[in-house]
């Protein structure tokens, strides 16, 4: 099936062909007709499957079918991070190459005045992070009375980053009659709750099981002591001749420390996280894509939305606290059907995190020890099954009156939730996955 058979105009099909795409991906096959029909849509797909085009192409088609003379914006796309906002804006520009559409992108970390001047000239499509968008609204630089289509991209991450208050403020300012689209790699229960109050009888599209990893990604675990991780990473980069590898750490400071150690070891590296200025983040990503930097060290928030074509390697220097983030991390490789490798350097103190990930993806990851880096403490081969509290209650006490030596009900494992954690804080508060208030983080 071709893009033209989905109902897209010749101009949009030509722009898509210019990018080397002739056959729609599964998410595009289902989402494009649904969006073109004018229905609300709730879509989930693994990262790297073309979901951005899944809403960008039909969005542009709908605007072209109903041209209006106004200052807009007519379509509003909200994203959680600066990098994802810039990526979506680039996609809008590429696909609108042959149609008269004006697009703009606004996010924090850069001067606001140029963004205000751009908006005053009028735009059809506005891509924005919630915090900067509210700043612009409060300075009378943007109005929402002409919005016809709202897109929440990676909405689960926006809630985790504490943007829920800003999002609700924006929703209250939008026209009641509009089309709403929710696109994400996965949908948490919190997102489904938000969707119930936002979407009107939506078309639901889910082309892959929730929280599963792409089959094209080869995954493995390298057991190693925490103190040996940096040395092992340097060895793997050198021995395998890796020229481009994305490495994840849990914290900003950890990313900085690792980058410095790799540089001292003669491996070009750069860090990207929420404390870096937008200029520094842009330069680091550009140098990485150009091959001037071999290792890009990133935290989860900064890496959400990074689109690096044919990225061969992703390394988890530290496992994430939340198992779902593992799926997002390794989804940076193996994109659009390409093969990729994802390996995790795991120390014994991360055993519970690894068990949580393996339960989530429903597979045991192969362990590969490297000679000279064998850990002092071995990782468990299989995640421990949670004890059944009912069986513990029914077990008779043994060895003494009033005492029970049966197993205690197992608690939650896998580390702390994300609520209240993050890279920089802002004014909004929402609910993190742990149920505690989450500060709005820098995008």
Image (tube, grey):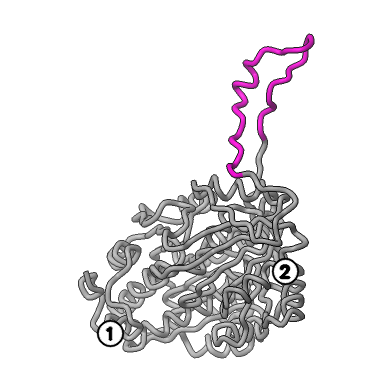
Residue where numbered disc 2 is placed: 231
Which of the image's four quarters has the C terminus? bottom right
Q: Please state which of residues 81 and 269 is positioned toward the viewer in this rendering.
A: 269
Residue 217 at x, y = what percent? 46, 63
Residue located at (45% from left, 52% from top): 210
Report whether residue 426 is seen.
no
Proximity of marks 1 and 2: CB atoms separated by less than 8 Å:
no
* Camera-nearest label, 1 or 2: 2
Outermost residue, front side? 371
Residue 14 disc label: 1
Numbered range of the magenta stretch: 381-410
Report whether residue 418 is seen.
yes
Disc 1 residue crowd, few under 14, some 14–19, many 20+, Cα 10 Å = some
Q: In this view, does 320 lie above or below 231?
A: above
Q: Is residue 407 on the magenta stretch?
A: yes
Q: Please state which of residues 376 and 22 is positioned toward the viewer in this rendering.
A: 376
Q: In this view, does 87 lie above or below 120?
A: above
């Amino acid at each position: 099936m071709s893009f033209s058979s989905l109902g897209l105009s010749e101009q949009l099909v030509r722009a898509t062909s210019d990018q080397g795409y002739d056959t729609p991906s599964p998410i595009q096959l289902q989402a494009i007709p649904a969006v073109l029909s004018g229905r609300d849509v709730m879509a989930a797909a693994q990262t790297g499957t073309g979901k951005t085009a899944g809403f960008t192409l039909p969005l542009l088609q709908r605007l072209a079918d109903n041209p209006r003379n106004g200052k807009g914006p007519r379509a509003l796309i909200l994203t959680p991070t600066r990098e994802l906002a810039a990526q979506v804006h680039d996609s809008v520009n590429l696909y609108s190459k042959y149609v008269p559409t004006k697009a703009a992108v606004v996010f924090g970390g850069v001067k606001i005045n140029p963004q205000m001047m751009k908006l005053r000239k009028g735009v059809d499509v506005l891509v924005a992070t919630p915090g900067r968008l509210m700043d612009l609204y409060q300075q009378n630089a943007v109005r929402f009375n002409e919005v016809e289509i709202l897109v929440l991209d990676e909405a689960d991450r926006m809630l985790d980053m504490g943007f829920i208050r800003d999002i609700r403020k924006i929703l209250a300012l939008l026209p009641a009659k509009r089309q709403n689209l929710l696109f994400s790699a996965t949908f948490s229960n919190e997102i489904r709750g938000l969707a119930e109050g936002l979407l009107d009888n939506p078309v639901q599209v889910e082309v892959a099981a929730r929280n599963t990893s792409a089959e094209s990604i080869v995954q493995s675990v390298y057991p190693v002591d925490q103190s040996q991780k940096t040395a092992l990473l340097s060895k793997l980069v050198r021995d395998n001749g890796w020229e481009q590898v994305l490495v994840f750490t849990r914290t900003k400071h950890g990313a900085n420390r690792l980058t410095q150690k790799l540089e001292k070891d003669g491996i070009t590296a750069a860090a990207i996280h929420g404390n870096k200025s937008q200029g520094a983040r842009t330069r680091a990503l550009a140098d990485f894509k150009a091959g001037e930097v071999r290792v890009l060290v990133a935290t989860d928030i900064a890496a959400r939305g990074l689109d690096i074509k044919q990225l061969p390697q992703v390394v988890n220097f530290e496992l994430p606290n939340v198992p779902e983030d593992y799926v997002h991390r390794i989804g940076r490789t193996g994109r659009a059907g390409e093969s990729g490798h994802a390996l995790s350097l795991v120390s014994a103190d991360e055993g519970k995190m690894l068990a949580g990930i393996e339960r989530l993806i429903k597979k045991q990851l192969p362990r590969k020890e490297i000679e000279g880096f064998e850990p002092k403490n071995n990782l468990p081969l299989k995640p421990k099954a949670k004890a059944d509290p009912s069986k513990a209650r029914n077990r008779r006490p043994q060895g003494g009156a009033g005492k029970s030596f049966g197993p205690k009900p197992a608690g939650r494992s896998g580390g702390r939730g994300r609520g209240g954690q993050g890279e920089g804080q802002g004014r909004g508060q929402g609910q993190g996955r742990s149920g505690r208030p989450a500060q709005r983080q820098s995008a």
